[in-house]
Image (spheres, rainbow, N blue to C red):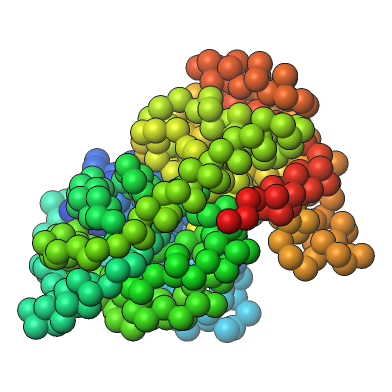
Amino acid sequence: MQNTDKIHIQHLAEICARKGMKQVVLSPGSRCAPLVIAFNRHPEIECFSIVDERSAAFFALGLAQQSGKPVGLICTSGSAVLNYAPAVAEAFYQKIPLVLLTADRPNEWIDQGENQSIQQFEVFKNYIKKSYQLPTNVSTKEDLWYCDRLVSEALNNAVFPSFGPVHVNIPLREPLYTLVKAQTLDVKIVEAAKANISVELQELENLKTIWKKAKKKLIVVGLQKHINPKIKEVLSVLNKQDDIVVLHESISNFSAENTFGQIDPLIEVISKNKLKDFVPEVIITFGNGVVSKKLKFWLRNNEVKQHWHISNNFEHWDNFQALTKVIQSDVVNFFNELKAVESSASNYFTLWKKLEEKVKVFSSNYLKETVYSDFKVFETIMKKIPEGTNIHFGNSTPVRYANLISLPKNITVNANRGVSGIDGQVSTALGASVFNKKLTICITGDLALMYDSNAFWNNYLHPNFKVILINNNGGNIFKIIPGPGSLQEVDKYFETNNRYSAAHLCNLHDLDYLLANNEQELEEKLSLFFSKKNKASLLEIKTDGDISATILKKYFEALPTI
């Protein structure tokens, strides 16, 4: 078998494979030819070809999000590299191991007006764990040793001490397409030893003392990409105590008996009635961020004495403006320590439970009586979702409605909530569907779908991939959040009204297309939608944006007082 004549690129592919990279997403170009040859001809690596680099990067994000393994991205030089930026930022803040392998011109041709040449080294400086650049000339054993060492370090950095993107920039000289007979490779591998991070004993005892004295303890579970059964197990013990309340959202991928998932209506009632008894004495947070602005503002506006954030990365995330302690520890180990602490006499959990029961009755009655709208649509969809589904919620309204409605059991929820942009939502979900092979549904809005329409421009649309499009003719979030709805510019410059349908996209890319315009059609089309097994499909649900915004506002206004 033949391979590229650039031996350091052969080594690069071999090291990536040995360090767990099994999938690489390629975008076409000439300068990256040696990389394409080496990775495509490696027997342990699966390659995907996606033309649009922005979509390719989000597709890779979906693969890595599901696999928990480093996924490679290969592109040519120049502006192609810049198209990776949105997905790189998302991977950085969501902690996903993308490995960017960008081909480049030789150093002497940068800033010389050479075709497809820009300053590529450290181009992602603020959104990457670390940047590397391989030497242009690799002619000695020392050169090869140096390349191998850099590649090992980059791959280690992508997964230790936590996941995140790394960038390896690779200047390449012509000729680019020369092949030689492949040989057995003697590559240098540098391994990374896993560390067990824990809190020092005396510090732990001090924290336990504070925890024991507190009568109102709040645990907030942030974004997690997967359900962690060990976390669920330990929190299922803690949440049986009357002094502990556990809050989580759809993107937390956590639910258990006696925990609270629909946060926003609860916080709205608490805030509206100025119920001080609900304000915690100690908050513990872990995982990535939360969606709920109501939760953030409520905690910011109240004096919380202690906020502990658990993070392997030692992140000082102070979203509630109450941070007092960063705990560098494994989440399960730390909660196992707290599990042994005697609980305080308290009615804190009972307060929350009584409020939740009242809000659930109100919400159920409200949805029964309300007219066809986005809120009603989301309730109907969630009742029909099959168990075991992987749902990808789009940003703006979809992920927010998901936090108002009970979700089906035994599902996994993902969302691009690292940066929370609308770009790349469909591409990420598609990448996830290719890896996990199970039913994967992207629920998104019309602007986000059109923005990422190149997600369908590839050969990886399989029957397990489905898209539910809520088409309310624009970015309806701007009629919901405080501020823009009262401006004369809202329709044209914020909501950005559109009259487009996804039918033409489905025809272009050969997806099954279904359309629902009202509640009766929605019930019928959802059943048909989930029964389709032959190819990827899209269900477009038309709603009225003005009505939908009004229904949601009235819901929060009408929530019961206490």
User: Relative to residue 53, is residue 207 depicted above or below?
Assistant: below
Can you tell which quarter of the image residue 323 is in? bottom left
Depth check, front residue: 298 or 374: 298
Which residue is rendered at x = 43% and y = 37% of the image?
390
Quadrant in the picture for the C terminus? bottom right
Left-right relation of 539 to 308: right
Coordinates of residue 534 in the picture (x, y in percent)? 52, 16
Q: Give the farthest residue toward the left.
A: 201
Quadrant in the picture for the N terminus? top left
Depth check, front residue: 171 or 455: 455
Q: Give the farthest residue toward the right.
A: 488
User: Relative to residue 295, is residue 282 depicted above or below?
Assistant: below
Depth check, front residue: 63 or 547: 547
Coordinates of residue 208 in the picture (x, y in percent)? 16, 74
Left-right relation of 202 to 22: left
Coordinates of residue 228 in the picture (x, y in percent)? 26, 48
- Judge whether residue 424 can be spotted in this image: no
Left-right relation of 242 to 491: left
- Judge whether residue 249 can be spotted in this image: yes
User: Relative to residue 525, is residue 334 depicted above or below?
Assistant: below
Which residue is rendered at x = 13% and y = 77% of the image?
204
Which residue is rendered at x = 30% and y = 62% of the image?
346
